[in-house]
Image: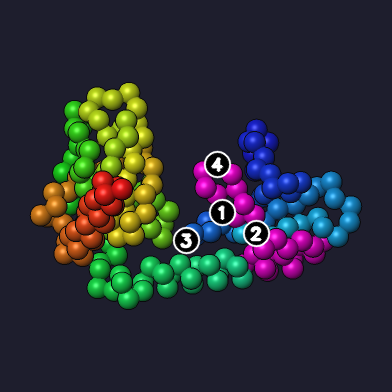
Amino acid sequence: MDSNEEKRMAGDFVIFHSLHIGDREIVLGENPDCVDEQRYMCAFCTNNGIMALYTEIMVSDDYPELAALFGRRVAEQAEKTRVDLNGPKIQGIPNAPILASGCDAIGHHSDIHGKIVVIRPEVLRPEYRRATSQLHLCNGGFGASPNSRGSACSCTELYSGKTSRFERSDVLGTIEPEKLPQWAKHCLDALQAEKEKKSKDREGR
């Protein structure tokens, strides 16, 4: 860690090694001021963008022991993520990323409200650099408007239905619904049907 970088802390522990894969991050930390048997720590971390939650915390004064635990947890989380990304729902879907040649470029003048957008693969973690994680429906946000000073876009992933925030600069381009692969068309239809159902439910109250 660069001495000029702000230290990442988990309580009294300085996080000096971490790996984020799938839905969880595994961290390894040290309490340099500790004089008892709790100098080192290994834990899982989840972060909702506001605060970090550390769970399954193990502490020890035996660094090799916790380094080995870190390695096992990374391997287990990697395998869980591999299974999740290659389950029955995703079988038959190419896992290659969508590149610039596979979508329409956007400029500052482009309005991307309600458009199917393609997220740049390089802004996603390696395990998610595939079409199922790139294709989103842009719901809005200042960044969706043309020539806006704002940059945030609210997007819903077609494959999972999960809503996330991206910067406008994260958007590689757009794809017209009729040009989507069949699996994405099916996901889009299901997503729009769910939105219509929720809208009717609200109107019926």
The disc labelled 4 sits on which kind of residue? Ile
Counting residues from the start of the chain, the first of labels 1 and 2 encountered is 1
- Residue 150 x/y as whole percent: 34, 27
Residue 187 visible in the displayed image: yes
* Residue lying farthest to the right in this orientation: 35
Is 58 inside the magenta-drawn segment?
yes
Residue name at image x 80 percent, y 47 percent: 32
Residue identifier under label 3: 22
* Residue lying farthest to the left in this orientation: 178
The disc labelled 3 sits on which kind of residue? Gly
Q: In this view, does 8 lie above or below 25?
A: above
Give the colour scheme shown.
Answer: rainbow
**Gap in angstroms between the C-alphas marked 4 and 3:** 19 Å
Residue name at image x 32 percent, y 23 percent: 149
Residue identifier under label 4: 50
* Quarter where residue 187 is shown: bottom left
